[in-house]
Image: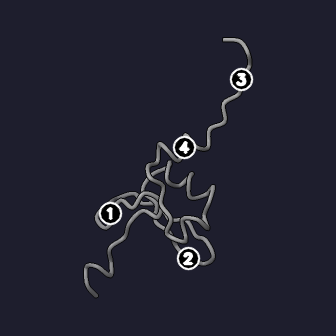
Amino acid sequence: MSAEDTKEECAVCGKDLSEANGVAHLYHDGRRFPLCCPMCMQLFQRAPARFARGERPQSIVEELMAEMKWKETGRW
């Protein structure tokens, strides 16, 4: 087995996890997906099919900002 076969990366952000400690794994449709941090876990849980297809956000911050909904209350 080559080093490339054992390379593991975060399913959300693509960070190399081959030598990382404390990696989490979630499952979707019987497949195991490694995740590097709580933020990536949360994003994966919101759209597992998307990340299972290999889609990745431009940036984690942009992904979270796109999900925020601002309410106008008319007062400060």
Tag 3 residue: 72
Contact, CB < 8 Å: mark 1 with mark 4? no
Which of discs 4 and 2 lies nearer the camera? The answer is 4
Q: Secondary structure at mark 2?
A: strand
Tag in front: 1 or 4: 4
Camera-nearest residue between 28 and 59: 59
Q: CA distance from mark 4 to mark 3?
A: 19 Å
* Mark 2 crowd level (few <14, some 14–19, many ≥20, 10 Å Cα): few
Name which residue lies at 34% across and 63% down: 17
Dot in front, 4 or 3: 3
Q: Which mark is residue 16?
A: 1
Q: Earlier in the sequence, mark 2 or mark 1?
A: 1
Of circles 1 and 3, which is in front? Answer: 3
Mark 3 and mark 2 lie on one chain; the one further toward the N terminus is: 2
Q: Residue furthest bottom?
A: 1
Circle 4: residue type: Leu
Residues at circles 4 and 3 in contact by the CB criterion of under 8 Å = no
The percent coordinates of residue 25 (x first, y second) are 50, 65
Question: SS class of the residue under badge 1?
Answer: loop
Is 58 in front, or is 32?
58
**Visual colour scheme:** one colour
Distance from label 1 to label 3 (Cα)?
A: 40 Å
Left or right placement of residue 30 versus residue 59 in this view? right
Q: Which residue is mark 2?
A: 31
Residue bearing mark 4: 64
Outermost residue, left direction?
Answer: 3
Q: Are marks 1 and 3 in contact (CB under 8 Å)?
A: no
Which class describes the residues within 10 Å of circle 4: few (<14), some (14-19), or many (20+)? few
